[in-house]
Amino acid sequence: MKIGKALCPLNVLVAALLFTASNVSSSTDIPSGRKFAFSTKSKEAKEHVDRALRMIENFQFSPQVLAVAKKGVEADPQFAFAHYLVGATTSPSSEAKPHMEKALELAKNASDGERRFIEAVALVQAKKPETALGIVVDLAKQYPDERLVHMMLGQINANQGKLEEAKRAFEKAIRIDGGTPRVYGSLGNVYLLKGDYGKAREFFKTSLSKRLEGTAPNVPNYGLAFTYLYKGDVKSALEILEGFRDEYTRTGGRPDLPPVFVWNSIGRLLLENGRAAESIQAYENGYATVPGSSISEEEKKIWLGRFHHGRGRALAKMGKHEEAWKEVELIKKMIEEAGERGKQFEPASHYLAGYLKLESGDFPAAIDHLKQADQTDPFHKLLLARAYEKVGDQANAQKIYKEIVESTQNSMERALAYPEAKKKLKI
C-alpha cells in the first residue's frame, strides 16, 4: 500500500515485492521438490535471511531488516538472495542499485527458483510486469508450496488490477502459513480495491491481531482508516489515524521516520473536510517532531517543504490567497536552491500552485499547473478534473474521473479522490 511518498524512501517496487516474502527453504527441507532451495551452503547466511524475512512478515522496518540482511551477505558474499534483501531495504534507490545488480549477477549461478524469483523482480523494476508475472506463474506451478512465490504472485496481480488472481494467491499463502500479519494486510488491500470495505476491515483487524507486541504497523492501520474514508466516514478514519499516531509514538516507530507522516495524514483529512484551521495545527505538530529526530538534514528539509505545502493549501481553503501564494514562492525557492536534486519536487510545486489557483477561481491557470503535477496521483488528477469541469470541458473531466476509478493504487490520494470520481461518473 502506498501511504504517500513520505513513506516510500526505498525503491518502491523492489520493496513491495520483498515485503511479501517469508519462509526461506533450504536443501534439507524440500524432499518433495515443492519448494525451491537457496544457493548458499552457509547455515549462518540462511539463518540471517530467514530472520530478515520473518521481520518483514511481522511489519518490522527496513533499517532493522537491512542490518540483518547485511549479516547474510557477510556470512556468504556469493549468496544472491542476501544481496537482493540488502538492495530492497537500502535507501535511496541510487544506493540500492549496485546491490540489486550484484544479486542479478550472482543469481546466474543460484538455484533455479532463487534465480527466476530475482529476475522477476528485476523485470518489475524495468516496468515489464506482464513478463515478470509469466515467470512467477510458472514458479508457482513448479514450486506449489513455496509461500514466497505465492506472495509475489499476489502482489504483482494486485498491482495489475487482477484482483481475483491476487486474492487466490494470498489465500494460498495463508494455507501454507497464516501465522504472520502481512498477508492479511495484503488481502485487506485487495478487498479495498474490490470495493468490499467490510471484508477489507475484517482482514486489517486480523492483521493487527497478529502483530508483534511493541510494533505499530502502518498497513493495517491506514487500511482500516481507508475503509471508512471510502464510505465518507471521516470521523472514524480520523479516530483510527489518531490512535495509530499515539501508538507509533509510544512504540518508537521507525528509527528513520518520526511520526510527522501520521500528523500530515490527519492534517490532510481535516483540510479536505472543511477544517482548514485545524489542519494547519496538525501540520505544525507534525513538523515539530522533525528537527530533533535522527533523520538526515536533507530529509528534514523535505519535511519542511511538505509543511509549507500543507500550510499553503490550508490558507487557500481559508480564502487567504496572498498568504497562500507566498508558500508557493517559498517552495519554488527551496527547489531552485536544491539544484539538480530539487527537480524531483517540481510536480509537487505545480500541484500546490494548481490547488491555489483552483481555490482562487483562476481555472485556466489551475489547469496549466495541474497538467504538470504528478499524473499518477489520483488526487492531483481529481483537481485537474474539477478544473476542467469549471471551464466546461466535460469530456476531459469525465475521462480523468474514469481513470481515477480504474486506478489500482491503495493510497490516501485514491481514498480521497475515488468517492467523488465515482459519483461524477454516476456509477
Image: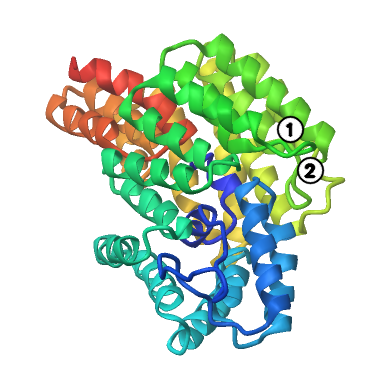
Q: Position of residue 211 (x, y in %)?
A: 68, 37
Kind of element beneath mark 2 = loop
* Res. 246 in view: yes
How many numbered badges does the structure rendering display?
2
Q: Position of residue 361 (x, y in %)?
A: 37, 21
Determine which of the numbered discs, if any, sits on residue 418 in the image.
none
Q: Are marks 2 and 1 in contact (CB under 8 Å)?
A: yes
User: What residue does disc 2 label?
Assistant: 290
In this view, 312 is above or below 390: below
Q: Residue at x 26, y 20 (%)?
A: 422
In this view, 135 is above or below 280: below
Left or right placement of residue 366 versus residue 240 in this view: left
Q: Could you tell me how far apart the alpha carbons at marks 2 and 1 are, in whole angstroms?
A: 7 Å
User: What residue does disc 1 label?
Assistant: 286
Q: Nearer the viewer, residue 126 or 72?
A: 72
Decide: few, some or many residues near mark 1? Use Cα within 10 Å; few <14, some 14-19, many ≥20.
Answer: many
In this view, 388 is above or below 125: above
Which quadrant of the structure image shows residue 296?
bottom right
Q: Which residue reaches farthest left?
A: 395
Left or right placement of residue 220 versus residue 66 in this view: left
In this view, 159 is above or below 276: below
Q: Nearer the viewer, residue 102 or 213?
A: 213
Q: Which residue reaches farthest right?
A: 292
Q: Residue at x 73, y 47 (%)?
A: 257
Q: Residue at x 30, y 35 (%)?
A: 367
Kind of element beneath mark 1 = helix
Amino acid of disc 1 = Gly
Left or right placement of residue 45 versus residue 411 in this view: right
Q: Position of residue 392 (x, y in %)?
A: 17, 22
Decide: few, some or many residues near mark 2? Use Cα within 10 Å; few <14, some 14-19, many ≥20.
Answer: many
* Res. 360 in view: no
Amino acid of disc 2 = Val
